[in-house]
Amino acid sequence: MDGPLGRRLPALCLRPGGRSTALLLARVGHAGDVSGVSIEASGAAGNGVIAGHGVLAKLAWALRSEPGDVRPHNEDYAGAFAPTTPDDSWDRGPLVVVADGLGGHAAGEVASRVAVEAAIADWTRGAAQAPRQALRSAVRTANVAVYDAALESGRHGMGTTMTALTLAGHSGLVANVGDSRAYLVRGDECSQLTSDHSKVGEMLRMRLITPEQATNHPARSMLTRSLGADAAVQVDIVETDVARDDVFILCSDGLWDAVARDELGKIVSSVLHERGQTAVDVTAALVDLAIKRDAPDNVSAAVVHVLSDRPIPAAAGRRSLFRRR
């Protein structure tokens, strides 16, 4: 593959297919039940439909990205790095990433894909660091990759949001740039972990407008920070404690714009506890509901369900999973 993908990510096995190129990092190790390994190329425009899921000893994860019914191209992208070696030999924690591309479909779909691939590549091959530093490094590497890709392709305005989660010990760390969000559902409560880097987000924090006014504000889509805009970027890192049965939700604005925060908690509780289903079902329920409500943008969600009280090792094997169907 020509361009920044081929140059920056030599470890990726690329399968030709234009916009529907499928990819998978070499599989390493054997421990753990990790599903969603097969790769299929989607015929949809842009990044198409992306889906993947896995179950480890201490957590289950699932992700899904859909173009939706309003926009013809999918400019979102999502990916996950999951360990396949015994947890006592992990050297890098699990990583889940969601990105929402900017700059029109020709640029946005490239930016989000480049960013997620670059972040996961840096996460898997970078020098051993504390989780917070490693997470910040991954997002900064993604920023440089998008910035370089924009320069090389001449696509002015190309950029992307990014929200990324890793778990280490009894802590969850979230990095974000832009307005893709991370939520924590604990019991019946759902809290937003990230702050939107947008004009409306700033006005809300300054109490210049109310949440009700923000819903239809003309500046609601204007970002104040994104990957690819400059060679350097400020990355926000939020840390929270982690307990058994916690659920993290990472999502693009297509989801949070259509599904309210209190609804997220109710859906998680209904799917996991009342129906006894899994993270895959939570992800499907969230994305399907947003699309049913005519989400104004592409819809992406990643769900991580903590299954154990035991601390999660701050490290992981050498595998990244992407699936397109």
Image (spheres, rainbow, N blue to C red):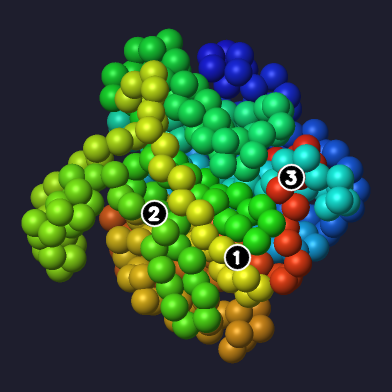
Residue 305, given in percent of the width and then of the height, sits at: 63, 67
Give the label on residue 318, or none.
none
The residue under label 1 is 242
Disc 2, SS? loop
Nearest to the observer: residue 135 or residue 109: 135
Compute the Cα span from label 2 to label 3: 23 Å
Give the label on residue 315, or none.
3
Identified by mark 2, the residue type is: Thr
What crowding class fits label 1: few (fewer than 14 Cα within 10 Å), some (14-19), or many (20 or more)? many
Q: Earlier in the sequence, mark 1 or mark 3?
A: 1
- What is the residue that sits farthest to the left in this orientation? 208
Relative side of 276 to 150, left or right: right
- Number of the front mark, 1 or 2: 1
Residue drawn at the location 44% of the way across and 78% of the way down: 189
Identified by mark 3, the residue type is: Ala
Answer above or below: position of 258 versus 120: below
Nearest to the observer: residue 121 or residue 313: 313
The residue under label 2 is 194
- What is the residue that sits farthest to the right in this orientation? 30
Relative side of 84 to 271, left or right: right
Disc 3, SS? loop
